[in-house]
Image (cartoon, helix red, strand yellow):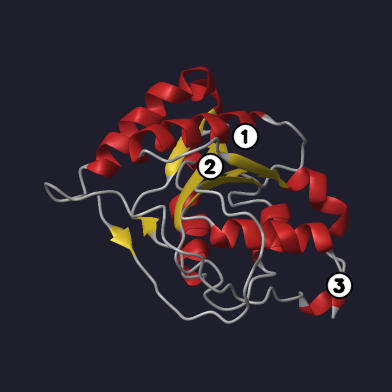
Amino acid sequence: MTFTDSTSTSTSPSTDRRDDLVVLVGNPRPRSRTRTAAEAVARRLADRAGLRGTPRTIDLADLAGQLLLAEAPDVDAALRTVAAAPFAVVATPVYKASYTGLLKAFLDRYGPRGLAGVTAVPLVVSASPDHSRAGDDHLRPLLVELGARVPDSSLALLETQLPDVDVVADAWLDAWSDAWPPGAAWPDASLPEVPLPVAGVPEAVR
């Protein structure tokens, strides 16, 4: 498996804490099964990558009331947290054969290349195998557009696979890890802080 890698220069510094791995959950239901699955995937990824600390979760259901406001300090802090992380698991249930509007509203607040420097794992949870390509067809291209480094294949979970999420995640990570040539390491999670892009405000609330 290979990656799409985009790079850019960003302009606005952040003083927020830096987390090696962030879980971004786009399910409108708080404490959802999508969140549980994403956190499980993040733990497996952290073990593989040798990342320090516990993955930090941003549950967008907790921020839904601010996402369309012009001034949203909690959302802005979340944007900085995700953009500063070397790794992010970006998770969504499949809504209307795509990602949720909640996740789109959050990611739309980034400026161009707002996730440059982040290795992002697209994770989609669906009820039907017919929707298993929603990550590849919709979520992955959005993350690439924002400058993230993204594997060629999203991690797709059926609801029936949720009890076995660790097994499915390990199989996917095995395929992902095979992309690194012999002797290669995971990207350095201890790189110094980089300036972050200024989060944009959707036109509807400008």
Q: Where is residue 145 in the image (x, y as percent from the top left)?
A: 49, 71
Q: Distance between the residues labelled 1 and 3?
A: 28 Å
Checking the image for residue 124, the label placed there is: 2
Q: Is residue 99 left or right of residue 28?
A: left
Query: Identity of the amino acid at label 1?
Result: Thr
| Chain-order first, disc 1 or disc 2 | 1
In the displayed structure, 103 sits above or below 52; it is below
Q: Nearer the viewer, residue 132 or 76?
A: 76
Tag nearer the camera, 3 or 2: 3
Query: Identity of the amino acid at label 3?
Result: Ala
Q: Quadrant of residue 50?
A: top left
Query: Identity of the amino acid at label 2?
Result: Val
Tag nearer the camera, 1 or 3: 3
Q: List the residue tagged with mark 1.
A: 34
| Chain-order first, disc 1 or disc 3 | 1
Label 2 neighbour load within 10 Å: few <14, some 14-19, many 20+: many
Q: List the residue tagged with mark 3.
A: 70
Q: Residue at x 78, y 44 (%)?
A: 61
- Residue furthest top as drawn: 163
